[in-house]
Image: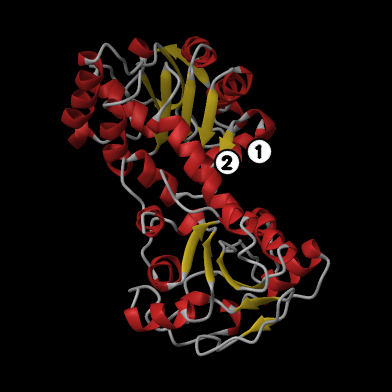
């Protein structure tokens, strides 16, 4: 994927003294008092901002926060806590500017934060009027917010159309490289783990991956539907019987290519969905009508772990069981540890996946951890993200 990279712009010396507009993803969780509870996204934005400041640029950075109403700013929509935290990380004051669309005063070597961009009228629908005003604020537009790359909005797409230069920041560039390595030119065997509560929410991803991967490991409620499709009883487990034909089609598509969807041979069941429910390991053929399947069994987990250790590339989206409950975490834990031990290039994404990675302390052993939830899923579906599309167009001249 050919896009202009901010690192190349800086290396050319062009950024010195220029006005640089960075679209970051600073949409962090806050408690009811407005305190930031987790600052990963802010910390991830620092390298791009430092690059611009070190190059002697006049730097503007903005982001969305929450779901504000356009044209109706409220105190809880403010990026003030984010500006404060960014200032602490950079060791400098970060002024926060409101009502900035018509013009921003910022000098070379300075950094300002522009208030929540989703409050601007026309942002969501990518109005041309807003896009042209945003583009007029800068000499260089830097997209560094992969979490928004699947949305064509004023501050993610429109500005990239009209800014004199549009390029990918280091975070976005790293995502492009990791995605290309995992999906466009993977080292084989390519193994994908797709888990979640519903087949319907991941059906297009499963169908897209079935054309490309060597093994498609399914987990969670999705695995239950595939077990049902394979003729197994799943008791009262979460599943979608209306999608059995789709699950069978994915199994057949994989089989036609000499690939497979491994169906669990053993499972961990309970009678109720609760942290203190009694866990029972059973053969997949012995599930009772009143059982809930809440994890894959130890035999299945070890089989999958063996496959993962032998993989060339691993794509991971979703835990394979209710890993939040200690009695039903073994499957996810074994898989996480197998990915960590594998020599394969691994890319992982999705909120629950990141929580599992953090829980088992394998951050340093995963090849790339994606920062985008919805954007990561759309890439797995085989879609071209709007942010990638416009940056490719601009790079092509």
* 159 lies above or below 357: below
Q: Secondary structure at mark 1?
A: helix
Name the one closer to the observer, 281 or 367.
367
Name the one closer to the observer, 322 or 143.
143
Whether residue 155 sits left or right of residue 216 in the image: it is right
Name the one closer to the observer, 68 or 285.
68
Residue 52: quarter of image: bottom right
Q: In what quadrant of the picture does the N terminus appear? A: top left
* 53 lies above or below 359: below
Q: Residue at x 32, y 41 (%)?
A: 381
- Residue under numbered circle 1: 358
Checking the image for residue 354, the label placed there is 2
Checking the image for residue 33, the label placed there is none
* 153 lies above or below 176: below
Q: Position of residue 296 (x, y in %)?
A: 46, 20
Please say whether residue 220 is visible from this viewpoint. no
Name the one closer to the observer, 31 or 386.
386
Residue 187: quarter of image: top left
Q: Secondary structure at mark 2?
A: helix
Please say whether residue 243 is visible from this viewpoint. yes
Q: Position of residue 25 (x, y in %)?
A: 56, 61
Query: What distance separates the C-alpha of mark 1 from that of mark 2?
Result: 6 Å
Q: Residue at x 61, y 61 (%)?
A: 29
Q: What is the basis of the colouring in this image? A: secondary structure
Q: Residue at x 44, y 87 (%)?
A: 71
Instruction: Farthest residue to the right: give it.
Output: 91
Whether residue 367 sits left or right of residue 88 in the image: it is left
Q: Position of residue 115 (x, y in %)?
A: 58, 79
Asked if the residue at tag 2 contacts the one at tag 1, i.e. Cβ–Cβ closer than 8 Å, the answer is yes
Crowd rating for badge 1 (residues with CA inside 10 Å; few <14, some 14–19, many 20+): few
Q: Position of residue 336 (x, y in %)?
A: 58, 25
Instruction: Farthest residue to the left: give it.
Output: 245
């Amino acid at each position: 994927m050919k896009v202009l990279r901010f690192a190349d712009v800086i290396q050319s010396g062009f950024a010195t003294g220029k006005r640089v507009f960075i679209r970051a993803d600073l949409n962090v969780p806050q408690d009811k008092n407005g305190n930031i509870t987790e600052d990963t996204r802010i910390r991830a934005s620092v390298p791009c901002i430092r690059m611009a400041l070190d190059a002697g640029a006049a730097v503007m950075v903005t982001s969305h926060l929450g779901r504000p109403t356009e044209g109706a700013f409220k105190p809880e929509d403010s990026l003030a806590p984010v500006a404060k935290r960014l200032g602490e990380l950079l060791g400098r004051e970060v002024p926060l500017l409101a009502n900035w669309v018509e013009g921003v005063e910022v000098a070379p070597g300075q950094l300002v934060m522009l208030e929540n961009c989703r409050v601007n009228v026309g942002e969501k629908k990518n109005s041309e009027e807003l896009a042209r005003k945003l583009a007029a604020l800068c000499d260089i537009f830097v997209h560094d917010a992969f979490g928004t790359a699947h949305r064509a909005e004023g501050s993610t797409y429109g500005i990239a159309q009209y800014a004199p230069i549009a390029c990918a920041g280091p975070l976005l560039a790293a995502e492009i490289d990791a995605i290309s390595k995992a999906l466009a030119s993977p080292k084989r065997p390519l193994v994908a783990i797709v888990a979640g509560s519903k087949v319907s929410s991941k059906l297009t991803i499963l169908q897209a991956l079935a054309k490309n991967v060597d093994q498609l490991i399914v987990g969670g409620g999705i695995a239950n539907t595939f077990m049902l499709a394979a003729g197994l009883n799943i008791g009262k487990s979460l599943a979608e019987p209306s999608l059995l034909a789709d699950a069978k089609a994915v199994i057949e598509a994989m089989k036609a290519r000499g690939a497979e969807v491994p169906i669990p041979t053993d499972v961990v069941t309970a009678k109720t969905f609760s942290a203190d429910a009694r866990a029972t390991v059973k053969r997949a053929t012995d599930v009772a009508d009143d059982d809930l399947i809440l994890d894959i069994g130890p035999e299945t987990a070890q089989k999958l772990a063996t496959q993962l250790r032998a993989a060339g590339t691993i794509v991971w989206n979703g835990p394979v069981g209710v890993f939040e409950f200690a009695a039903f975490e073994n499957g996810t834990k074994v898989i996480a540890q197998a990915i960590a031990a594998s020599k394969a290039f691994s890319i992982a994404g999705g909120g629950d996946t990141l929580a599992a990675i953090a829980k088992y302390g394998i951050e340093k052993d995963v090849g790339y951890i994606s920062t985008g939830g919805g954007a990561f899923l759309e890439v797995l579906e085989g879609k071209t993200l709007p942010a990638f599309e416009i940056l490719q167009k601009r790079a092509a001249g």
